[in-house]
Amino acid sequence: MYLAKSCIGFFIFFLAPLACAENPPGALRCELLLHPEQTLLTDLSPEFSWRIPSSRNGVRQTAYQIIISASRVLAEKERGDVWDSGKVASDQSVDVPFAGGSLAPDRDYYWRVRIWCGDGKPSPYSNVQKIRFTDSTDPYATDNRVWYNRLPLQQVSIAPASMKEIRPGSYFIDFGRAAFATLRIEALEHRQSPWRVRLGEALTQEGRIDANPGGARRCRTWTQPMPLDGSPQILKIPPDRRNTSGDAVLMPPEMGEVMPFRYCELENVSGVLSPDHVQQLAVHYPFDESASSFRCSNQILNDVWDLCKYSIKATSFLGVYVDGDRERIPYEGDAYINQLSHYCVDAEYSLARHTIEYLFRHPTWPAEWQMHMVLMAWKDYLYTGNPELLIRHYEDLAAKTLLGLSREDGLIVEDSARMTPPFLRSLNLTSPPRILVDWPPASFTHADRYGERDGYDMRPVNAVANAFHYHTLRLMEAISLAAERPEEAPLWRQRADRVYRSFQTVFYDTEKGVYRDSEGSSHSALHANFFPLAFGLAPAAQSARIVAFIKSRGMACSVYGSQHLLDALYQEGESEYALSLMTATHDRSWAHMIYNVKSTITTEAWDNKYKENQDWNHAWGAAPANIIPRGLMGLEPLQPGCARMRIKPQIGNLEFAEIKHPTLRGPVTLRVEQSAAGRRLRLTLPAGMTGELHLPVTDIAAVREGDRPLAKNPHVVFSRLQDGCVVLDLASGSYFFQIN
């Protein structure tokens, strides 16, 4: 009876959507960009997106009209002299294609949109947005902007958090957090030239800047001539030869050099220096602080979130994801974590797309890093809804599966004989890739005999590399459908199925109930088990023993490995153990970075002893920025462009957790509370999005929405029971669920 009533409500919802004509569409984007006027677009057939302006339950757009005008005046008069789509019956509000004639480069255009939501009345037109195009013959630039026309980086002035005079003419300044920045000195009545400047990330036990912090931790000391007229001065930081030469990405010349620093010491200063005279001039990619938030009942996890969110902002200083300050080079494995985390802290997708395009040009050496490109491209599609990258780079992505290294049973082999010149050219490499597993190995540091690989037995037929290979084959099946090559999907599935069978035969140790590191090995490392678990290779009958083994090893992996370890744990419902890893305080934890290392950006390794040359500004250490939203709060896109979201919170033993999660369609907000009396869940899905909600109960009668049974809500439909959860289909809008 309940199901019948719910289906009727669901049917009525889709046939009779509510009106939303009072307000115009907002958050306009062209080619994923909120501010396309700040750069030049390369795709003369662009896509447009907007947000539907309603918070009422069940609101759905039924039609839109886009106009493009040759001048702002005409656009404001609602005259689309370049293109008028007319009223198009569609609920699409993300990645809507231009369907007019040709747009020309080196011309300004102005566009706006209005929508209908079911009552026959159009909304007002949106604000006007300016766009401009340029010619591009770059085969790796899909739809954002050309490399030399990056969205302008922002320079932000940050006042000192504290400042003290050490002795006459000498000052110590703390800016509160490290940033990639330089120093600006404002007007000062008296100046003596030159000043002695020291900038750094770390302190000595005496509370002064550590001039020799070791590894790739940063400190620079130099003598700075100062203008005697007291005019404002931006200090010129001496460049580091390693990260400003070779393959390093360079700062825009007009901005000058920056370095990561939190602390400043100034000596030989005449006159009285006050906090108003000194500013940290930080550089980062445009970032919306209000786009996301997270708070819970555990203060350590709150601090971890703040650290990781800030790390994504701070390390964007080059307009492309890089591996930190030591090299300033994009790496695929780093970029994947950076990409997912960026999606979860800001509704910004252009920087990830640009980084993917850069990495097609400039691949790096690890074998798994090649395969990460398939993961990155698929996540780009899921979050943006735009398939152009998949279509344009389909052959590149197929090569990145490393299918060319496969033997008869489907498993790939690290074999130089298979790495022929044509194979290397398909990857855009000049030298053979090598299996990484994790970094660094034991030989890299003498502090731990296992390194970050948990003593992994490295051999040519490797479990981790083949787990990645299997995952990329499964993704290529989905990519072939999205890239309009459906005839290739069965072939990718057959390849994946062959690898699945061979993986169990070659790597599974039936006696121990876990996976071996390599063919011919008897050793089982943490990595040989959490990667297969994360990528769907562990049969359900075997997963309990594998999980038990994983839990016995703790955090025996690097900050990079923690991304996939935590993904695997949340996929298996191990929420309390995953939470314990994210809130741990030992020396392999984010709390250790915050409270003991005292870094304000995630570090390259858990501690200096685990990587002696590490830097303190590596976004690949920021996994909780995406694991908290995707795992703990359970928010992940099920359909491209976040048209449908899975909501499956797993908050472990927290009393409450709440999040604001950005998407192109608008933010998803979720608050979960639990106590002996039951569980409460408040959820808002933006208009244009549906949801699949997983509630941890098997009796649907125990669930209420607001003050009524589920059957009374026309926007909630029972879907199924799955893995001990009631699964509900939700229309957009706000809900309050209670489980008693």
Image (cartoon, rainbow, N blue to C red):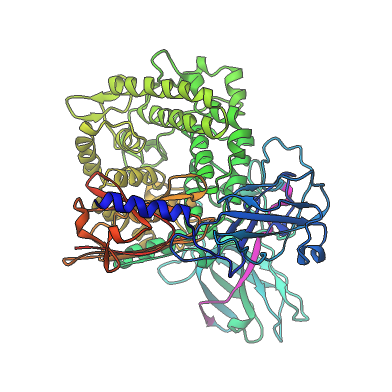
Residue 585 visible in image: no
Q: Looking at this view, is 138 or 82 the one in front? A: 82
Q: Position of residue 160 (x, y in %)?
A: 55, 77
Would you say residue 308 sits in the magenta stretch? no
Looking at the image, which residue sits at the far top?
408
Quarter of the image where the C terminus is located: bottom left
The spot of residue 35 in percent (x, y) is 67, 60
Height in image: 614 above or below 308? above
In the image, the segment drawn in magenta is: 148-166
With respect to residue 143, does 671 lie above or below?
Answer: below
Residue at 25% across, 52% down:
2
Q: How many marks?
A: 0
Q: Is residue 164 magenta?
A: yes
Residue 297: x and y, percent? 29, 68
> Of residues 415 and 693, which is closer to you in this image?
693
Q: Residue at x 37, y 35 (%)?
A: 535
Where residue 307 sits, quadrant-wise, is bottom left
Q: Can residue 452 be seen here? A: yes
- Given residues 181 and 373, the one toward you in this image is 373
Residue 204 shown left or right of residue 429 in the figure: left
Report whether 427 appears left or right of 109: left
Is residue 222 found left or right of 681 in the rendered image? right
**Residue 406 place in picture, x, y as percent:** 45, 18
Seen from the viewer's position, the closer of residues 441 and 561 is 561
Q: Residue at x 39, y 46 (%)?
A: 563
